[in-house]
Image: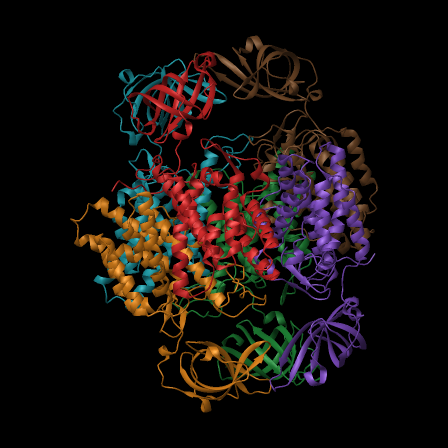
Chain colours: A cyan, B green, C brown, D orange, E red, F purple
């Protein structure tokens, strides 16, 4: 509902405080700049004459009952808060997240793992997912670039799974080359798992975690796969020779290590297997499509019919009218 | 059969002359370095004591009956030609081309066009294909990078069509965004059409054409789409307003102009519509997969289990054993 | 006169509103930040206690009679508006434009075209100019880089014409190489014509047009030259063979397509004819000279004796004292 | 002695075959191009009229007794082999290696580890070195760039240890900042350990190993440190909290992962601790000094007083006369 | 003391005005934003109701007695000035500078020069230092990157001298290569001397000088060394031949000209002598260590346990707890 | 005449030996690969059965009487030498040089200097030219890129003078900006003077000089201008103040130091005066035009109607038919 308020209306709403900044007028009165949001979108609001005693702490991430008046200021909608008070509503019900059912799409991703026929590939994937199953469903795929909402990583992985499954079948059928579809799906599912420790979320707000400065997600994931695969082989030394194990483990590590595609994009090695080539390009396809879609679904830019410009891609995107 | 000859055998074959270099020994005798090939592969051969009077001209692209002895020289197979004489065999039957039936896959591509519902998009695509239908089926997708065989462009376009159709449906279903699947398919089918004048082929040998130095394929295609679309609107002014026409034409031009993705990769504009984003990334996916596959199917490199290194990607690719 | 006002004076002026931003003081009173300008320069002004009822709409691009007091605020001049009211003055008479007579310099440019001896080159140039003659005289050469004023493109083209005519004669005389001076002049005159649809101007304010996001000026111009040249040859098939026509048309297209000099600077092809080499470098020379001159003629920077730094060239420029 | 032979001499020598290429003269006679070497240097030689039956296999890495005549050919010394026969000499005694005593300098490196006071840092370093102690002493630091001889990695690490120990003390004393000297020395000693599986050597010849294509040395080392550190903490859970352990382990991983300094140089993360900054720059200093020294000690280039040009650094280096 | 003030305290202090900005409230009252500092750090303060008559000019670089109240505003400490009046304290006693005794470390640097055995190298170094001895002790090593305080260049040179002396001895001992330690130390001491005219300081405030726009420090130093060396040889023609002199002079010029290491980092030539290689890498080591240390000693960043991000290095640095 | 020999002819010629390589056939006979040339061009020739006793030394740069037979080998003309003997002809009369009269164009360049009105600019230019007048007339502008023949630098400077004089007048007239035409011409004349010590020529053969490795031409010229200008001011202290002198000298140094335009192109500073902007762009224009012209006048490339590809510009250039 916050996202659909129009100029001139007065409204009562339950909303989550997404951002909070305190200010003081020149005459010495405190005020708050609050960004309020719910599933429908967000609105920047002013609370004049703020006093903690009267209004409470109004922390980021808390839920409030609010009455506000909407007007246009310098061409953008702004809310002026009349009354505001704490609400007991669960913030997770209000925050914008993936538009799909996390449990359903997580189950679909898990179903791909269940079909794996390579025992080590299957076991490592299962363990990695099991170790952080709840985080995996909550973490975003990025902060501010694409799929940057709770559940965004899962949504990105799920979309890639559907495309990757089709594309792997397509090439195996056309060119009869015996690459491993298991490894393609492993790479798709695990490529960004390290973001579980690179970001922090409580399901409502999202931040970078300090851990990611020293070990970004590609580094963590290399370490995790090495450890899990080594442990698996210690328990299953008869499944394959040592040399075969090393080759298999290195392929799993390689797909994840190379998924950014180039050294200057943060991968310490370039894709050198067909599986790694596919994972890199399908990741790129879904990331860039979702990045563009995010801008298209956001606020219009200053050029009529185009989105705000993308900072990373250095272009605006054409808007689409409803069908 | 040329591609399956082994060390030590003597063989009689019908083959096409793919490359020809003339040399003179220090003692003044002429010889030829001939690369002979058929559908199964190619072999570098020596013809000692060459005389035009005796052996004929032996031009590139001509077919010969040859008797040769195969040996290993510095770790590579080499043929020593005993007798060689012109053959009346049609060279097109011997040359390695797409491994698919060109007429069948061209028909599949045409079927996508037949389903277009946007009249201008459909008409422009039809005219562009009709104007160069035979060339479209013969030209390679590249000289020396991927799909570099007669029919390679068609094969690349067809593979992209299948992936693109799936991916466009996938995103339209998931995200309900009204982008145009017609334009995605138009972009896939037409993105490299300019190569018809950038390369020259007689179905046997393939070369760059001088025309491509001044107007590479992206430039030609921009001009063609402009001209065809303008002509269509002159005949169909009632289908849409002038402004709508300009917007529609610009979108078609844009998808083709931006398909390399970045200025430094030769596109004068970056993808700025969802259709253009999809076409660029699906082109990239298929090109890079086919580039890696080409190396994997070629001669092994010096590192055991890996292909020769890619000059453009600066990595070798892991080889796969038969399933 | 706006550009010559000094600290402490009170003045009455007729000025154009170049920029307008609305604000509200903390005590709830509206005010306007107006940038007023005339041919002599511009000044940032404050209008306290703004009410639409009292002051009118005060839109960007409109002309006003104004009384103001000039003072220094944080080291910069600022006007405080006393009274302000609409004026019936034609804004085009007030706006800063090219310092030359547009009709005179346009005529000089046209005179070069009149001397062309190559019929197709002449016809295409004439048609392109005729189609947008008024726009050609009004559009800037850039938004914010060089010649960024109404008439700026024409001024840039005219300056390049004089230099290009000299340079082409110079090299033809010294090195006896039969390149085409007509094509050099064609390239100079048409290289940036696509900006006519990349920018929007009413002769007073200048903005990017949405059209330029999908088809930047190099892409438009490729399409235009293709269409015009094809149409010319359809009517004049006897002037040259088809192959000659293709070669001639491609050269015209090439000069414009390559005028940025490199792929990373937005050209889909590098200059590959002497004409294209000359056009690229003369464009570069005039653009960079005018860019530096614009900074030198603007506000001084923080380093004594130097201009404000150039964002694109990453240097400041030395100031010159009057002769 | 091979490295000191002069033009015109005849000599008998025991030498190792470093490179071997087989050729055939136009008249059909086989010959070998052999590069022979011993500790003093190497010489390119010709063996005319080679027959396996007569001369034996003459494999790379084998030792031979040889009689040869030295002459100048196109300005370079060349040996013409008279007689050649297998020798039972141990090739490892003949090959050029580090100019220092490997056991002595390895002991000095180990002594640094023995002084570590951080238990996990010490244990992980000890285990990594113990696991590949002999390889560590044999492997080169690079193939063809610097320290590219058996024992080269050890020599590079030892030189860095001496500099790093001084520099760490220097900064700790001057700036009182409590970074960990143990971690600096750990980083120096372990930064290139992954090369043990990236290269293959038998102490005589050196090659890239296929394993390095999928997991270059930075990737291997990340995996190794993760596994070893995790195992250590499982056995020593009381030494520190889980959070402290994660932080300590991440720092060790980080130093090695970031030692190339930038993403485009192959590190998935930039140095973000003082220890990592020091290790990267000391590695750079020693690598570049040794690279220049290697060229200076090699053959003179075509410019008088300068070395052959460096392919990576794109300069020649000034030669020095003996003191 | 300014740097140690805490939230809630009232304090009286003597401080230097590091930055000054004037503002006006919406109700027309003037105020000042003053950054006050002393050796212990700095604090942003507000002076409401500023009038020059009452408070004096309060220029940048002047010293004041101030009474202030410290509070937290948007998470950062801020001072509210009660009373403020001019102080007669010498500003140089208050400004943050090198933490070492400038005279002592300058003497240590000079002692290295005194040991030079090459007469020209020694004379040129002595003259360059003598010509600007006081400036050399006052100038920073950079504006805003590392050692950006009065005396910072001297401190940087001194630290490099200690490291460089060790490293030069280390390599001379290990590899017996007769490079010149005198020239290494000359390069270390003189590499940034041109900053004496690239920056301006009065020992309190530091700014870029206009002169540096046309002749940055590498260009000035090239000119100075040329002139000084030429003059020395005119007086000492018997010490060496003309050719030897040219070679020696060029080496001195080269070390300084190449110390940034690459053309894109501002050096017109890459290091091509061992001395130049060492100077470049030791400069890099000390600059980057001090840059990281400066951030670590500054305000913490938004990620717990890490500094604010470096603009040039694009990473944050891990913080260290006190020992 | 060498440059006009056709396939099948036998001819007697006087020619200069431009390149010489010695070889041995597999049967042990020596031969020479000689590139012979005169003003009309060059031809690669074979001298079979070479013996120093019979044929003499045949050094590079010497002149010979030769009888040869011309044939086509692999599509290129080749001469087979019959008899060859030393000639007493002056090699300077035979070598290809500038197509203009060096004395005439040098006088024209000098005439520009004579018109300078700024005393220091004039004196420094005169001294620099006088110091190396003969070298200035002989040196090429580049080795292998453009104007790479004896006299090439002079020809390049002269062409730039004519263009620069026109362009400086053009901009001064149009924009009334008081930049210094003297300094533009100074920059044009002196920008590459350092090449006098970067290259070595005896008027016949051209090579890089070792000196250029340490001090490339931009570095030398900075030193020279500093020294000359300082010396001038010592003798003429009354002409301007010290500050004015420093500013004037820095401008002269700056134009030369910045003429490559960017750091990555070898300039330690970017053009920051209008004079420097003009010199950089006019240098670029003439260099790139002459580079393209050199390829166009050379051998045709493999694409019909186009030159061999440029290694630096990465394009071929369209050929022109005679007028």
Residue A71 x/y as whole percent: 45, 18
Q: Camera-side residue: D91 or B19?
A: D91
- Taking the image as drawn, is residue A251 in sight? yes
Residue F56 x/y as whole percent: 71, 81
Left or right of E175 on screen, residue D318: right
The image shows residue C221, relative to residue F177, as above or below, that is: below
User: Where does the N terminus of chain D fall, quadrant-wise?
Assistant: bottom left
Residue E244 x/y as whole percent: 58, 61
The image shows residue C171, relative to residue D135, as above or below, that is: above
* Residue at image location 57% in from the left, 56% down from the top: E250
Q: Camera-side residue: C37 or A62?
A: C37
The image shows residue B41, relative to residue E289, as above or below, that is: below
Instruction: Name the residue at the left extreme.
Output: D238
The image shows residue E73, relative to residue A213, as above or below, that is: above
Left or right of A127 on screen, residue F120: right
Give the total number of marks visible in the rendering: 0
Q: Camera-side residue: C314 or C143?
A: C314
Left or right of B276 on screen, residue A65: left
- Taking the image as drawn, is residue A261 in sight? no
Q: Camera-side residue: B181 or D310?
A: D310
* Residue at image location 61% in from the left, 77% down from the top: B33
Quadrant assignment, res C286: top right
Instruction: Name the residue at the bottom extreme.
Output: D54
Residue C281 x/y as whole percent: 69, 46
């Amino acid at each position: 509902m916050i996202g659909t308020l129009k100029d001139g209306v007065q409204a009562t709403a339950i909303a989550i405080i997404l951002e909070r900044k305190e200010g003081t007028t020149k005459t010495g009165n405190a005020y708050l700049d609050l960004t309020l949001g719910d599933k429908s979108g967000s609105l920047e609001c002013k609370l004049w004459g703020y006093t903690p005693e009267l209004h409470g702490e109004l922390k980021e991430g808390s839920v409030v009952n609010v009455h506000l008046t909407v007007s246009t200021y310098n061409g953008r909608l702004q809310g002026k808060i009349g009354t505001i008070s704490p609400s007991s509503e669960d913030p997770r019900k209000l925050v914008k997240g993936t538009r799909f059912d996390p449990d359903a799409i997580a189950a679909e991703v898990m179903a791909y793992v269940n079909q794996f026929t390579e025992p080590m590939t299957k076991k490592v994937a299962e363990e990695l997912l099991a170790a952080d199953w709840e985080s995996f469903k909550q973490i975003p795929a990025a902060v501010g670039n694409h799929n940057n909402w709770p559940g965004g990583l899962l949504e990105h992985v799920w979309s890639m799974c559907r495309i990757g499954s089709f594309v792997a079948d397509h090439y195996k059928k056309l060119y009869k080359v015996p690459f491993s579809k298991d490894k393609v799906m492993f790479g798709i599912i695990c490529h960004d798992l390290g973001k579980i420790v690179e970001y922090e979320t409580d399901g409502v707000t999202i931040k970078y975690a300090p851990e990611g400065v020293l070990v970004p997600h590609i580094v963590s994931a290399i370490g995790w796969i090495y450890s899990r695969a080594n442990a698996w082989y210690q328990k299953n030394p008869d499944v394959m020779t040592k040399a075969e194990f090393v080759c298999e483990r290195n392929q799993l590590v390689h797909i994840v290590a190379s998924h950014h595609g180039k050294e200057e994009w943060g991968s310490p090695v370039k894709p050198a297997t067909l599986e790694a080539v596919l994972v890199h390009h399908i990741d790129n396809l879904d990331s860039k499509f979702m990045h563009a879609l995010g801008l298209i679904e956001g606020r219009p830019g200053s050029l009529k019919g185009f989105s705000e410009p993308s900072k990373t891609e250095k272009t605006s995107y054409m808007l689409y009218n409803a069908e």
